[in-house]
Amino acid sequence: MTLPKTMRAMLLDAPRSPLRLAEIPVPQPGPGQVLLKVRACGVCHTDLHIVDGELTEPKLPLVLGHQIVGTVVGRGAGAGRFRTGERVGVPWLGSTDGTCPACRRGQENLCDHPVFTGYSVDGGFAEYTVADERFCFPLPDAYADVDAAPLLCAGLIGYRTYRMAGENVEALGFYGFGAAAHLIAQVARFEGKKIYAFTRPGDRAAQEFALRQGADWAGDSTVAPPEPLDAALIFAPVGPLVVEALKAVRKGGVVVCGGIHMSDIPSFPYALLWEERVVRSVANLTRRDGEEFFAVAPKVPVRAEVQTFPLEAADQALNLLRSGGLTGAAVLVV
Ligand SMILES: [Zn+2]
Ligand SMILES: [Zn+2]
């Protein structure tokens, strides 16, 4: 198969500007990298935070996209993990140095010199991309391309967030019931948890969506749940939710913030944190999170509610995500 010299890509030239459809060179795979023909790429809140300038150090111009499903069509020097023609997934954590103190502690998600897909290197809003093969995942055959894409960020980082809630969790709250929550709620229900979904006050559509996805209860983020929560997962980038979630968890309960960016957390009385309540964040993912999640996902089976867009409509997908006009996950079909 001969590869074209150039490809279509959606380029971000500068923060707070629309993406631009451009014809750019097909990237060459470097040592240890695979060249992928992109089949589908998920659109994530993090993409929005990059476009909106809230994540301040993107490569520019940039091809966004870090939930890539692609076929291996080329391999760089030393790359041999995947066959040509094999389907793989590329997540947000594109590579690490492997040598910094965090990596040596087994916390590669906290690497001092990480490479993030679609942020510090080009991602998947394009016809082709390159990726470090060590950080790609083989994808379960049970998933079509568009169904696998949202699992690669919303699913993986959502899964890490869920695991950080710890053992001894029965009543589990979700603050923000979008892409990540609707996937992880399925795993939680499979594992016998009771699911409480909190949405923007008055957002009946989101509450009905949560109930359709198997939540036991859905309501406004400002109201108390019918029973105290053992843990709460926050997926909406809204700092005041940390305080609401602390009010809702029992003694010793855990509040886990799953997003990469959040508005400021207002000050709150110490009494809300007292009695060993815990607030923590989750950063990025490890390869192990991915292996665990892709092992459990087909058993549940985790099914993403997906809205698809052509590559050129990436901006439209981002705008819908910004306005809360999406239910489930947006995926670009390339
Ligand atoms: Zn993401
Ligand atoms: Zn490192």
Image (cartoon, rainbow, N blue to C red):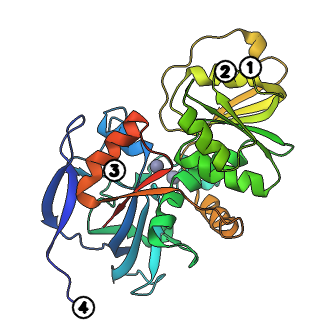
First reached walking from the N terminus: tag 4 or tag 2: 4
What label sits on residue 244 in the rendered view? 2
Q: Label 1 to label 2, Cα distance in Å?
A: 5 Å
Q: Which residue is mark 4?
A: 1
Q: Count residues near mark 3 (Cα–Cα under 10 Å), then give few for <14, some for 14-19, many for 20+.
A: some
Residue type for callout 4: Met
Q: Label 4 to label 1, Cα distance in Å?
A: 59 Å
Q: Indicate the position of residue 82 as horizontal and vertical percent values.
A: 46, 82
Q: Residue furthest bottom?
A: 1
Residue 76, quarter of the rendered image: bottom left
Q: Specify whether residue 99 is in view.
A: yes
Q: Which residue is mark 3?
A: 120
What label sits on residue 247 in the rendered view? 1
Q: Tell me if label 1 and label 2 are in contact, CB under 8 Å.
A: yes
Residue in the image at 36% along x and 32% along y: 54
Q: Label 4 to label 3, Cα distance in Å?
A: 30 Å
| Position of the C terminus by quadrant | bottom left
Residue in the image at 34% along x and 74% along y: 36
Q: Label 3 to label 2, Cα distance in Å?
A: 34 Å
Residue 232, quarter of the rendered image: top right
The answer to whether 208 is drawn above or below residue 74 in the figure is above
Residue type for callout 3: Ser
Could you tell whether 60 is left or right of 121 in the image? left
- SS for callout 4: loop
